[in-house]
Image (cartoon, rainbow, N blue to C red):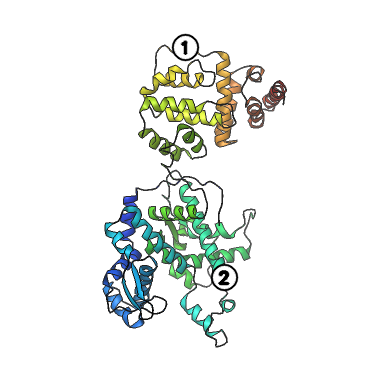
Amino acid sequence: MSDSSILQPARLRPEAELARDALSTPVLSRAARLARWAGPATRVDAGGGLVDEQLPDAAAELGLSGEDAAADAGEAWRVAVDTGLVEVVDEEEGTVRAGDELSLLTAGSPQDVLSVWLGALETVLGDASVPDLGGLVDAIAGGEGSGELDLDALDWNPEAEAEFLDGVLGNLYLLTVGEDKAGDAPVPLPALAASVIVPDDMAEPSNDVLEQVSDAMMRLDDQFRMLEPVGLVEYQPVDEALMADADEEPAAQVDDTDVARYGLVRLTPLGLYGLRTRLLEAGFEAPAVGDLADKGADALLDGTAAYPPAAAHAETRHWLERRRPLEAARELLAAARGSDEGAPLRRLRCQQALSLVGAAAEPALREVLDDAELGGLARVWLAEHGAADVPPPSEAMIFWLTIDTVAAQLAAEGNSEELRSLVEGLARQHSGFFDTAWRVGHPATADVLEAMGRLHPDKRIAKEARKAAFKARSQQGN
């Protein structure tokens, strides 16, 4: 399923580090170990799974014991086959050999290793969407003795189940990349379940919805237990005592002090990489910090327009590290010009980027002192850096820069509290501000004055702003 929406940028770890993480995951390390263990005497069934009599030896090879040892060994083998670590040579004879992918784990690049891990992830995600084995056996037995799977008796829709899990993981991804410190705090399982169950317009969940959330939590608890060994998540399971208590209240109404008992999940750095890859394959625009490092300044300023501050800062640092400071400053200033709707925010991003360049940028800023669009920005930068002999701005330049700054803040933040404070400050510090502001020849003048009329709490001043906006539109002929 494709989507054209643009997500917040992911802050990924280096691929070499992610590849090391992938190799150490229980799922992939076990699969690789069984691939090396397999020999001429190894036999598989028609589906490529190890024959039953060889599962105990496979479990022993992996150091597994207990009632789940054979099942865990079988899962590790299935991952080895699905990822190409093992290849079936003769389906009728059931013989196998080491696959071409096995050598990639030791001699391949980090990208090769991650490619194998992504294959393992798909296998585990597929398994996580399947009901428990006991339910499957009952559903097959209920198929009127035919030995066929009765999906109606099982009440299981494979596509719906996969879509549910994808939706949950998508929300976990959004929560991870949406924070300035990606993934620092684990997400409570009730909140994650509610994010895909409770309608956005429902102020207070009904009892029926709360029950659906509780049911979803139990499904997710099983699924995240399966997804942790492949390295997708770090998971603190639901307290067993809660699941044993049938009288427990629906988990969507959890006291903050008990939230850990209801499960906590965090996307790992490897999991962030894996989900981003799946999103890209599904047609989403899922940028990562560093994507713009090799592109021009215009792509940087436009691309970081919707980024949160920390991500924009990191992306800009990546971009600057590949360029000489003075050349970078000139390229940024050239890209900041324009009278289109996105130009004010480009200039704001340019100003933020130039703050990271340092004193080496000074010649580039002096070169644009007489530029109508960049002269005010240049004076601000030079003054902040203690430069000498900076010519004072004209009144026209001050007002133009003010309109440009408010337009950029509107584009970046909307009607925020910070912008409200800026608007109040402008009206307070400049008597007769609106008498002059409506004459400013900036494309966004009318829009900015209308916004000031919306945001200013004083009705008299707000009315002045709206009247000024009307005059500005009349002057522009709109």
Quick one: label 1, few (<14), some, or many (20+) residues within 10 Å? few
Residue 357 lies left or right of residue 129; in this view the side is left
Quadrant housing the C terminus: top right
Indicate which disc, 1 or 2, sits on the residue closer to the N terminus.
2
**Between 36 and 252, which is closer to the camera in this rendering?**
36
Which labelled disc corresponds to residue 293?
Answer: none
- The residue located at (65%, 26%) in the rendering is 449
Say what amino acid the circle numbered 2 marks.
Asn
Residue on which disc 1 sits: 391
Quick one: label 2, few (<14), some, or many (20+) residues within 10 Å? some
Residue 42 lies left or right of residue 446; in this view the side is left
Task: Indicate the secondary structure of the residue bearing disc 1.
Answer: loop
- The residue located at (40%, 68%) in the rendering is 82
**Between 403 and 192, which is closer to the camera in this rendering?**
403
Q: Can residue 254 be seen?
A: no
- Examine the image and state in which quarter residue 164 appears: bottom right
Q: Position of residue 454 (x, y in %)?
A: 66, 32
Residue 177, placed above or below residue 229: above
Task: Indicate the secondary structure of the residue bearing disc 2.
Answer: loop
Residue 328, placed above or below residue 36: above
Quadrant housing the N terminus: bottom right
Q: Residue furthest bottom?
A: 145
Say what amino acid the circle numbered 1 marks.
Pro
In 3D space, how far apart are the residues under numbered discs 1 and 2 (Cα atoms)? 71 Å
Q: Can residue 195 be seen?
A: yes
Q: Position of residue 162 (x, y in %)?
A: 52, 65
- The residue located at (44%, 27%) in the rendering is 331
Residue on which disc 2 sits: 157
